[in-house]
Image: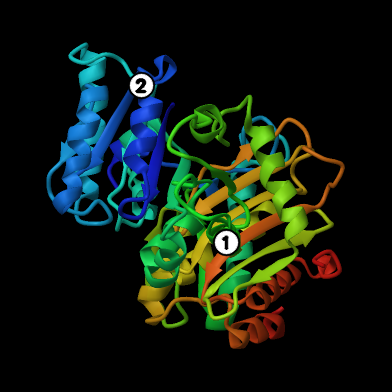
Protein backbone atom coordinates (compact mmCIF):
# COMPACT_ATOMS: atom_id res chain seq x y z
CA UNK A 1 0.00 0.00 0.00
CA UNK A 2 1.39 3.41 -0.90
CA UNK A 3 1.27 6.34 1.47
CA UNK A 4 -1.27 8.13 -0.67
CA UNK A 5 -3.84 5.42 -0.16
CA UNK A 6 -3.41 5.92 3.55
CA UNK A 7 -3.85 9.64 3.15
CA UNK A 8 -7.03 9.16 1.23
CA UNK A 9 -8.29 7.39 4.29
CA UNK A 10 -10.16 4.30 3.23
CA UNK A 11 -11.37 3.25 6.63
CA UNK A 12 -13.27 0.02 6.57
CA UNK A 13 -16.42 0.08 8.67
CA UNK A 14 -15.09 -2.55 11.04
CA UNK A 15 -12.09 -0.33 11.74
CA UNK A 16 -14.30 2.08 13.61
CA UNK A 17 -15.29 2.25 17.20
CA UNK A 18 -18.91 2.37 18.25
CA UNK A 19 -18.38 5.10 20.81
CA UNK A 20 -20.53 8.18 20.52
CA UNK A 21 -18.81 11.05 18.79
CA UNK A 22 -18.85 9.51 15.34
CA UNK A 23 -16.77 6.45 16.07
CA UNK A 24 -13.71 8.35 17.21
CA UNK A 25 -12.89 5.69 19.74
CA UNK A 26 -11.27 8.10 22.15
CA UNK A 27 -13.48 7.48 25.13
CA UNK A 28 -13.09 3.92 26.15
CA UNK A 29 -10.13 2.22 24.57
CA UNK A 30 -6.97 3.60 23.05
CA UNK A 31 -6.39 2.90 19.38
CA UNK A 32 -3.89 0.19 20.30
CA UNK A 33 -6.27 -1.42 22.76
CA UNK A 34 -9.08 -1.27 20.23
CA UNK A 35 -6.93 -2.98 17.62
CA UNK A 36 -5.74 -5.59 20.12
CA UNK A 37 -9.38 -6.32 20.96
CA UNK A 38 -10.20 -6.74 17.26
CA UNK A 39 -7.30 -9.17 16.86
CA UNK A 40 -8.49 -11.12 19.91
CA UNK A 41 -11.99 -11.46 18.50
CA UNK A 42 -10.66 -12.52 15.09
CA UNK A 43 -8.39 -15.04 16.79
CA UNK A 44 -11.41 -16.62 18.41
CA UNK A 45 -12.80 -17.19 14.93
CA UNK A 46 -9.46 -18.49 13.63
CA UNK A 47 -8.69 -20.78 16.57
CA UNK A 48 -10.16 -23.87 14.82
CA UNK A 49 -7.61 -23.37 12.03
CA UNK A 50 -4.67 -22.57 14.30
CA UNK A 51 -4.16 -19.22 12.61
CA UNK A 52 -3.40 -16.01 14.43
CA UNK A 53 -3.83 -12.33 13.78
CA UNK A 54 -1.81 -9.63 15.49
CA UNK A 55 -1.71 -5.87 15.25
CA UNK A 56 1.21 -4.47 13.28
CA UNK A 57 2.29 -0.95 14.25
CA UNK A 58 -1.35 0.16 14.60
CA UNK A 59 -1.52 0.39 10.83
CA UNK A 60 -2.06 -3.17 9.61
CA UNK A 61 -2.47 -6.68 10.90
CA UNK A 62 -0.30 -9.72 10.36
CA UNK A 63 -1.99 -13.05 9.79
CA UNK A 64 0.06 -16.16 10.51
CA UNK A 65 -0.78 -19.76 9.77
CA UNK A 66 0.29 -22.74 11.88
CA UNK A 67 2.89 -23.62 9.25
CA UNK A 68 4.52 -20.22 9.40
CA UNK A 69 3.01 -18.64 6.33
CA UNK A 70 2.04 -15.03 6.90
CA UNK A 71 0.32 -12.15 5.18
CA UNK A 72 -0.14 -8.48 6.02
CA UNK A 73 -3.68 -7.12 5.72
CA UNK A 74 -5.07 -3.62 6.11
CA UNK A 75 -8.35 -4.24 7.87
CA UNK A 76 -10.68 -6.87 9.28
CA UNK A 77 -12.48 -7.33 6.00
CA UNK A 78 -9.21 -8.23 4.30
CA UNK A 79 -8.46 -10.90 6.91
CA UNK A 80 -10.94 -13.33 5.41
CA UNK A 81 -9.46 -13.18 1.92
CA UNK A 82 -6.01 -13.77 3.40
CA UNK A 83 -7.27 -16.71 5.45
CA UNK A 84 -8.73 -18.19 2.31
CA UNK A 85 -5.42 -17.80 0.47
CA UNK A 86 -3.33 -19.28 3.29
CA UNK A 87 -5.51 -22.28 3.99
CA UNK A 88 -7.12 -22.74 0.59
CA UNK A 89 -10.71 -22.32 1.76
CA UNK A 90 -12.72 -19.54 3.39
CA UNK A 91 -13.93 -19.56 6.97
CA UNK A 92 -17.59 -20.47 6.76
CA UNK A 93 -19.38 -19.08 9.83
CA UNK A 94 -22.48 -21.12 8.95
CA UNK A 95 -20.60 -24.39 9.05
CA UNK A 96 -21.65 -26.53 12.05
CA UNK A 97 -18.15 -28.05 12.11
CA UNK A 98 -16.54 -24.62 12.50
CA UNK A 99 -19.04 -23.64 15.20
CA UNK A 100 -18.39 -26.88 17.09
CA UNK A 101 -14.63 -26.35 16.82
CA UNK A 102 -15.06 -22.77 17.95
CA UNK A 103 -16.80 -23.92 21.10
CA UNK A 104 -14.24 -26.62 21.79
CA UNK A 105 -11.44 -24.07 21.44
CA UNK A 106 -12.90 -21.59 23.91
CA UNK B 1 -22.06 14.05 0.17
CA UNK B 2 -24.12 13.78 -2.97
CA UNK B 3 -26.73 11.01 -2.81
CA UNK B 4 -26.84 8.51 -5.65
CA UNK B 5 -30.22 6.93 -6.21
CA UNK B 6 -30.47 3.75 -8.19
CA UNK B 7 -33.62 3.19 -10.20
CA UNK B 8 -33.98 -0.43 -11.14
CA UNK B 9 -36.77 -2.61 -12.49
CA UNK B 10 -37.39 -5.15 -15.19
CA UNK B 11 -37.79 -4.28 -18.87
CA UNK B 12 -40.90 -2.21 -19.45
CA UNK B 13 -41.67 -1.76 -15.77
CA UNK B 14 -41.83 2.03 -15.93
CA UNK B 15 -38.41 3.27 -14.83
CA UNK B 16 -38.33 5.93 -17.49
CA UNK B 17 -41.87 7.06 -16.78
CA UNK B 18 -40.90 7.57 -13.16
CA UNK B 19 -37.76 9.49 -14.02
CA UNK B 20 -39.44 11.61 -16.68
CA UNK B 21 -42.12 12.71 -14.28
CA UNK B 22 -39.92 13.30 -11.27
CA UNK B 23 -37.08 15.01 -13.12
CA UNK B 24 -39.47 17.51 -14.63
CA UNK B 25 -40.20 18.87 -11.15
CA UNK B 26 -38.36 22.04 -10.14
CA UNK B 27 -37.00 20.51 -6.94
CA UNK B 28 -35.23 17.82 -8.97
CA UNK B 29 -33.84 20.15 -11.60
CA UNK B 30 -30.33 19.84 -10.15
CA UNK B 31 -30.27 16.08 -10.63
CA UNK B 32 -27.71 14.44 -12.89
CA UNK B 33 -28.96 11.30 -14.56
CA UNK B 34 -26.90 8.37 -15.77
CA UNK B 35 -28.58 5.88 -18.01
CA UNK B 36 -26.93 3.09 -19.93
CA UNK B 37 -27.59 1.63 -23.26
CA UNK B 38 -28.47 -1.99 -23.59
CA UNK B 39 -29.87 -2.94 -26.96
CA UNK B 40 -33.20 -1.33 -27.58
CA UNK B 41 -33.39 0.03 -24.07
CA UNK B 42 -31.08 2.75 -25.32
CA UNK B 43 -34.32 4.34 -26.41
CA UNK B 44 -34.75 5.33 -22.78
CA UNK B 45 -31.98 7.78 -23.33
CA UNK B 46 -33.86 9.65 -26.03
CA UNK B 47 -36.75 10.13 -23.65
CA UNK B 48 -34.58 11.28 -20.82
CA UNK B 49 -32.42 13.57 -22.84
CA UNK B 50 -35.31 15.91 -23.35
CA UNK B 51 -35.83 16.53 -19.66
CA UNK B 52 -32.31 16.46 -18.33
CA UNK B 53 -29.18 17.95 -19.80
CA UNK B 54 -26.86 16.05 -17.46
CA UNK B 55 -27.49 12.69 -19.07
CA UNK B 56 -24.42 10.71 -19.88
CA UNK B 57 -24.91 7.61 -21.91
CA UNK B 58 -22.73 4.69 -20.96
CA UNK B 59 -21.93 2.93 -24.17
CA UNK B 60 -20.33 -0.37 -23.31
CA UNK B 61 -23.19 -2.65 -22.53
CA UNK B 62 -24.58 -3.90 -19.28
CA UNK B 63 -24.14 -1.88 -16.14
CA UNK B 64 -23.94 -4.84 -13.81
CA UNK B 65 -20.29 -5.74 -14.16
CA UNK B 66 -18.41 -4.93 -17.31
CA UNK B 67 -18.76 -1.19 -17.08
CA UNK B 68 -18.43 -0.64 -13.43
CA UNK B 69 -15.26 1.27 -14.16
CA UNK B 70 -17.25 3.32 -16.65
CA UNK B 71 -19.69 4.22 -13.93
CA UNK B 72 -16.81 5.27 -11.73
CA UNK B 73 -15.33 7.37 -14.53
CA UNK B 74 -18.72 8.81 -15.38
CA UNK B 75 -19.37 9.87 -11.82
CA UNK B 76 -15.90 11.33 -11.47
CA UNK B 77 -16.24 13.17 -14.77
CA UNK B 78 -19.60 14.58 -13.69
CA UNK B 79 -18.12 15.78 -10.44
CA UNK B 80 -15.06 17.31 -12.08
CA UNK B 81 -17.06 19.08 -14.74
CA UNK B 82 -19.45 20.51 -12.18
CA UNK B 83 -16.52 21.64 -10.04
CA UNK B 84 -14.92 23.29 -13.06
CA UNK B 85 -18.14 25.06 -13.94
CA UNK B 86 -18.56 23.24 -17.26
CA UNK B 87 -21.96 21.93 -16.21
CA UNK B 88 -24.32 23.19 -13.49
CA UNK B 89 -23.68 21.89 -10.00
CA UNK B 90 -25.91 19.00 -9.06
CA UNK B 91 -27.09 17.86 -5.68
CA UNK B 92 -28.26 14.37 -6.61
CA UNK B 93 -27.41 11.63 -9.09
CA UNK B 94 -29.85 9.07 -10.40
CA UNK B 95 -28.53 5.93 -12.07
CA UNK B 96 -31.08 4.10 -14.14
CA UNK B 97 -30.09 0.47 -14.61
CA UNK B 98 -31.00 -1.70 -17.52
CA UNK B 99 -33.97 -3.98 -17.02
CA UNK B 100 -31.70 -6.98 -16.68
CA UNK B 101 -29.09 -5.46 -14.41
CA UNK B 102 -28.34 -6.40 -10.87
CA UNK B 103 -28.28 -3.12 -8.90
CA UNK B 104 -25.89 -4.43 -6.24
CA UNK B 105 -22.67 -3.81 -8.20
CA UNK B 106 -23.58 -0.15 -8.52
CA UNK B 107 -23.55 0.09 -4.76
CA UNK B 108 -20.18 -1.64 -4.57
CA UNK B 109 -18.79 0.57 -7.32
CA UNK B 110 -19.37 3.65 -5.22
CA UNK B 111 -18.39 2.05 -1.93
CA UNK B 112 -15.12 0.66 -3.28
CA UNK B 113 -13.72 3.73 -5.01
CA UNK B 114 -11.94 6.09 -2.61
CA UNK B 115 -12.59 9.27 -4.54
CA UNK B 116 -16.23 8.49 -5.14
CA UNK B 117 -16.93 7.49 -1.57
CA UNK B 118 -15.66 10.82 -0.36
CA UNK B 119 -18.09 12.72 -2.59
CA UNK B 120 -21.03 10.41 -3.11
CA UNK B 121 -23.16 8.21 -0.94
CA UNK B 122 -25.75 5.62 -1.88
CA UNK B 123 -29.32 6.80 -1.46
CA UNK B 124 -32.45 4.77 -1.83
CA UNK B 125 -32.63 1.98 -4.36
CA UNK B 126 -35.98 2.28 -6.08
CA UNK B 127 -37.46 -0.66 -7.93
CA UNK B 128 -40.37 -0.48 -10.38
CA UNK B 129 -42.55 -3.53 -10.96
CA UNK B 130 -45.48 -3.50 -13.31
CA UNK B 131 -48.80 -4.82 -12.08
CA UNK B 132 -50.00 -6.48 -15.29
CA UNK B 133 -47.22 -8.97 -15.96
CA UNK B 134 -45.29 -8.46 -12.75
CA UNK B 135 -46.20 -11.73 -11.12
CA UNK B 136 -45.03 -13.82 -14.06
CA UNK B 137 -41.87 -11.76 -14.38
CA UNK B 138 -40.98 -12.17 -10.72
CA UNK B 139 -41.61 -15.89 -10.96
CA UNK B 140 -39.67 -16.48 -14.17
CA UNK B 141 -36.89 -13.91 -14.07
CA UNK B 142 -34.42 -14.20 -11.21
CA UNK B 143 -33.02 -10.77 -12.11
CA UNK B 144 -36.40 -9.17 -11.43
CA UNK B 145 -36.76 -10.92 -8.08
CA UNK B 146 -33.27 -9.83 -7.10
CA UNK B 147 -34.03 -6.20 -7.98
CA UNK B 148 -37.04 -6.31 -5.68
CA UNK B 149 -35.11 -7.89 -2.81
CA UNK B 150 -32.35 -5.29 -2.97
CA UNK B 151 -34.71 -2.29 -3.10
CA UNK B 152 -35.53 0.25 -0.41
CA UNK B 153 -38.64 1.45 -2.23
CA UNK B 154 -40.93 -0.47 -4.56
CA UNK B 155 -43.29 1.10 -7.04
CA UNK B 156 -46.06 -1.04 -8.44
CA UNK B 157 -46.72 0.59 -11.81
CA UNK B 158 -49.52 0.40 -14.36
CA UNK B 159 -52.08 -0.22 -11.64
CA UNK B 160 -54.69 1.47 -13.83
CA UNK B 161 -54.25 -1.31 -16.40
CA UNK B 162 -54.44 -4.29 -14.06
CA UNK B 163 -57.28 -6.05 -12.27
CA UNK B 164 -57.43 -5.67 -8.49
CA UNK B 165 -56.83 -9.40 -8.05
CA UNK B 166 -53.68 -9.28 -10.15
CA UNK B 167 -52.40 -6.26 -8.26
CA UNK B 168 -52.93 -7.95 -4.92
CA UNK B 169 -51.16 -11.04 -6.19
CA UNK B 170 -48.10 -9.04 -7.23
CA UNK B 171 -48.13 -7.16 -3.92
CA UNK B 172 -48.13 -10.40 -1.99
CA UNK B 173 -45.17 -11.63 -4.02
CA UNK B 174 -43.32 -8.34 -3.50
CA UNK B 175 -43.93 -8.54 0.21
CA UNK B 176 -42.54 -12.04 0.28
CA UNK B 177 -39.43 -11.05 -1.65
CA UNK B 178 -38.82 -7.92 0.40
CA UNK B 179 -41.00 -7.37 3.47
CA UNK B 180 -38.94 -4.37 4.59
CA UNK B 181 -39.45 -2.08 1.62
CA UNK B 182 -42.38 0.27 1.26
CA UNK B 183 -44.65 -0.59 -1.69
CA UNK B 184 -46.74 2.03 -3.51
CA UNK B 185 -49.34 1.56 -6.21
CA UNK B 186 -48.99 4.05 -9.05
CA UNK B 187 -50.54 4.84 -12.38
CA UNK B 188 -47.56 6.59 -13.90
CA UNK B 189 -48.04 9.98 -12.29
CA UNK B 190 -48.21 11.72 -8.93
CA UNK B 191 -45.17 9.92 -7.50
CA UNK B 192 -44.21 10.76 -3.94
CA UNK B 193 -40.73 11.74 -4.99
CA UNK B 194 -39.80 13.10 -1.59
CA UNK B 195 -40.20 9.74 0.14
CA UNK B 196 -38.86 7.81 -2.82
CA UNK B 197 -35.67 9.75 -3.38
CA UNK B 198 -34.99 11.97 -0.43
CA UNK B 199 -35.96 10.13 2.73
CA UNK B 200 -33.05 7.79 3.36
CA UNK B 201 -30.61 6.68 6.03
CA UNK B 202 -27.86 8.95 4.78
CA UNK B 203 -29.86 12.06 5.54
CA UNK B 204 -29.10 12.83 9.18
CA UNK B 205 -32.38 14.64 9.80
CA UNK B 206 -34.53 11.90 8.34
CA UNK B 207 -32.52 8.90 9.46
CA UNK B 208 -34.71 8.18 12.48
CA UNK B 209 -37.86 8.30 10.35
CA UNK B 210 -36.40 5.84 7.90
CA UNK B 211 -35.24 3.47 10.64
CA UNK B 212 -38.66 3.64 12.30
CA UNK B 213 -40.22 2.79 8.95
CA UNK B 214 -38.43 -0.52 8.51
CA UNK B 215 -38.47 -1.38 12.20
CA UNK B 216 -42.24 -1.24 12.09
CA UNK B 217 -42.20 -3.66 9.18
CA UNK B 218 -39.72 -5.89 10.99
CA UNK B 219 -42.00 -5.87 14.03
CA UNK B 220 -44.91 -7.26 12.06
CA UNK B 221 -42.86 -9.74 10.11
CA UNK B 222 -41.85 -12.52 12.43
CA UNK B 223 -40.38 -15.03 10.08
CA UNK B 224 -41.12 -15.31 6.42
CA UNK B 225 -40.29 -18.05 4.01
CA UNK B 226 -41.61 -18.46 0.52
CA UNK B 227 -42.76 -21.85 -0.52
CA UNK B 228 -40.94 -23.03 -3.64
CA UNK B 229 -38.57 -20.16 -3.39
CA UNK B 230 -35.06 -19.60 -2.18
CA UNK B 231 -35.68 -16.26 -0.56
CA UNK B 232 -35.83 -15.88 3.19
CA UNK B 233 -36.44 -12.78 5.23
CA UNK B 234 -36.24 -12.69 8.96
CA UNK B 235 -35.41 -10.61 11.99
CA UNK B 236 -32.79 -11.43 14.60
CA UNK B 237 -33.41 -9.81 17.96
CA UNK B 238 -30.99 -9.46 20.86
CA UNK B 239 -32.08 -8.08 24.18
CA UNK B 240 -28.64 -7.41 25.61
CA UNK B 241 -25.97 -5.04 24.31
CA UNK B 242 -23.70 -6.54 21.67
CA UNK B 243 -19.93 -6.17 21.36
CA UNK B 244 -19.45 -4.00 18.26
CA UNK B 245 -16.18 -5.61 17.27
CA UNK B 246 -17.54 -9.13 17.63
CA UNK B 247 -20.52 -8.22 15.48
CA UNK B 248 -18.28 -6.62 12.85
CA UNK B 249 -15.96 -9.61 12.72
CA UNK B 250 -18.88 -11.99 12.38
CA UNK B 251 -20.63 -9.98 9.67
CA UNK B 252 -17.50 -9.48 7.56
CA UNK B 253 -16.78 -13.20 7.86
CA UNK B 254 -20.34 -14.05 6.83
CA UNK B 255 -20.30 -11.65 3.89
CA UNK B 256 -16.92 -12.90 2.71
CA UNK B 257 -18.19 -16.48 2.59
CA UNK B 258 -21.83 -15.87 1.63
CA UNK B 259 -22.10 -12.24 0.48
CA UNK B 260 -23.83 -13.09 -2.77
CA UNK B 261 -26.56 -14.87 -0.80
CA UNK B 262 -27.08 -12.15 1.81
CA UNK B 263 -29.04 -9.79 -0.38
CA UNK B 264 -29.82 -7.19 2.26
CA UNK B 265 -28.97 -6.71 5.87
CA UNK B 266 -30.19 -3.81 7.96
CA UNK B 267 -30.01 -3.39 11.66
CA UNK B 268 -30.32 -1.18 14.65
CA UNK B 269 -27.83 -2.23 17.28
CA UNK B 270 -27.72 -1.76 21.01
CA UNK B 271 -23.97 -1.77 21.60
CA UNK B 272 -21.94 -2.04 24.76
CA UNK B 273 -19.81 0.85 23.63
CA UNK B 274 -22.61 3.28 22.91
CA UNK B 275 -25.59 4.68 24.77
CA UNK B 276 -27.31 5.55 21.53
CA UNK B 277 -28.19 3.06 18.80
CA UNK B 278 -26.04 2.41 15.76
CA UNK B 279 -27.58 1.67 12.39
CA UNK B 280 -25.95 -0.63 9.87
CA UNK B 281 -27.08 -1.58 6.41
CA UNK B 282 -25.57 -3.55 3.61
CA UNK B 283 -26.23 -4.86 0.13
CA UNK B 284 -24.51 -8.18 -0.50
CA UNK B 285 -20.77 -7.74 0.12
CA UNK B 286 -21.01 -4.01 0.75
CA UNK B 287 -21.79 -2.56 4.15
CA UNK B 288 -22.39 1.17 4.37
CA UNK B 289 -20.50 3.13 7.01
CA UNK B 290 -22.36 2.66 10.31
CA UNK B 291 -24.35 5.60 11.59
CA UNK B 292 -25.35 6.77 15.04
CA UNK B 293 -28.89 7.70 15.85
CA UNK B 294 -29.33 10.41 18.45
CA UNK B 295 -32.16 8.47 20.11
CA UNK B 296 -34.02 5.18 19.91
CA UNK B 297 -36.92 5.35 17.45
CA UNK B 298 -39.24 3.40 19.79
CA UNK B 299 -39.42 2.05 23.33
CA UNK B 300 -37.75 -1.21 22.37
CA UNK B 301 -34.04 -1.21 23.31
CA UNK B 302 -33.14 -4.53 21.75
CA UNK B 303 -30.89 -4.93 18.73
CA UNK B 304 -32.86 -5.89 15.67
CA UNK B 305 -31.17 -7.09 12.51
CA UNK B 306 -33.21 -7.85 9.43
CA UNK B 307 -31.95 -10.14 6.68
CA UNK B 308 -33.08 -10.98 3.17
CA UNK B 309 -31.18 -14.03 1.98
CA UNK B 310 -31.18 -16.51 -0.85
CA UNK B 311 -30.46 -20.16 -0.16
CA UNK B 312 -29.40 -19.44 3.40
CA UNK B 313 -31.71 -20.51 6.19
CA UNK B 314 -32.63 -18.28 9.10
CA UNK B 315 -31.69 -20.98 11.59
CA UNK B 316 -28.12 -21.16 10.24
CA UNK B 317 -27.52 -17.42 10.57
CA UNK B 318 -29.26 -17.16 13.93
CA UNK B 319 -27.27 -20.03 15.35
CA UNK B 320 -23.99 -18.78 13.91
CA UNK B 321 -24.28 -15.30 15.40
CA UNK B 322 -25.47 -16.59 18.77
CA UNK B 323 -22.69 -19.14 19.06
CA UNK B 324 -20.00 -16.76 17.83
CA UNK B 325 -20.98 -14.03 20.28
CA UNK B 326 -21.03 -16.61 23.04
CA UNK B 327 -17.58 -17.88 22.06
CA UNK B 328 -16.13 -14.38 22.04
CA UNK B 329 -17.55 -13.54 25.43
CA UNK B 330 -18.63 -16.74 27.19
CA UNK B 331 -20.27 -14.69 29.93
CA UNK B 332 -22.70 -13.33 27.35
CA UNK B 333 -24.04 -16.62 26.17
CA UNK B 334 -27.37 -15.93 27.80
CA UNK B 335 -27.48 -12.52 26.13
CA UNK B 336 -28.12 -13.83 22.67
CA UNK B 337 -31.69 -14.94 22.58
Q: Which residue is rendered at x = 74% and y = 47% of the image?
A: B216
Left or right placement of residue A63 versus residue A103 in this view: left
B316 is higher (above) or lower (below) than B164: below
In front: label 2 or label 1: 2
Label 1: how many residues lie within 10 Å, few (<14), some (14-19) or many (20+)? many
**Residue B235 — which label?**
none
Which scheme is used to colour this image of the protein? rainbow
Classify the position of the C terminus of chain B by image quarter: bottom right
On what subunit does the disc labeled 1 rest? B
Residue B196 location, x and y as percent?
A: 51, 35
Q: Which residue is mark 1?
A: B251
Residue at image location 24% in from the left, 26% down from the top: B78
Residue at 64% over, 81% down? A99
Same-chain check, marks 2 and 1 = yes
The chain carrying label 2 is B
Residue B123 placement, left or right of B140: right
Q: Position of residue A55 (x, y in %)?
A: 52, 56
Question: Dividing the picture into quarters, in which one does residue A27 lie?
Answer: top right
Looking at the rendered structure, the secondary structure element under dot 1 is helix
Amino acid sequence: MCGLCGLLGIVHWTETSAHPGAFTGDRRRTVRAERAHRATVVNTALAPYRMKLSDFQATSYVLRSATGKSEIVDDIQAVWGAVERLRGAPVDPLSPEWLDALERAT
Amino acid sequence: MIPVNVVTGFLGSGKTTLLREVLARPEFSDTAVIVNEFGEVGLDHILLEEVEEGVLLLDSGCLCCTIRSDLQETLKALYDRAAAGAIPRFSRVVVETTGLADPAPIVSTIAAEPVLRNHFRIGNIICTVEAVAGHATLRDQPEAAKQVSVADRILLTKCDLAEEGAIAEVEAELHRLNPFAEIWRTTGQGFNADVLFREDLGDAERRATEVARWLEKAHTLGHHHIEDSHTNSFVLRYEHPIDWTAFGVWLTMLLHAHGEKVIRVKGILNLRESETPVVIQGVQHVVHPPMHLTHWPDADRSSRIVFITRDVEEAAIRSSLRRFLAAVRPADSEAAA
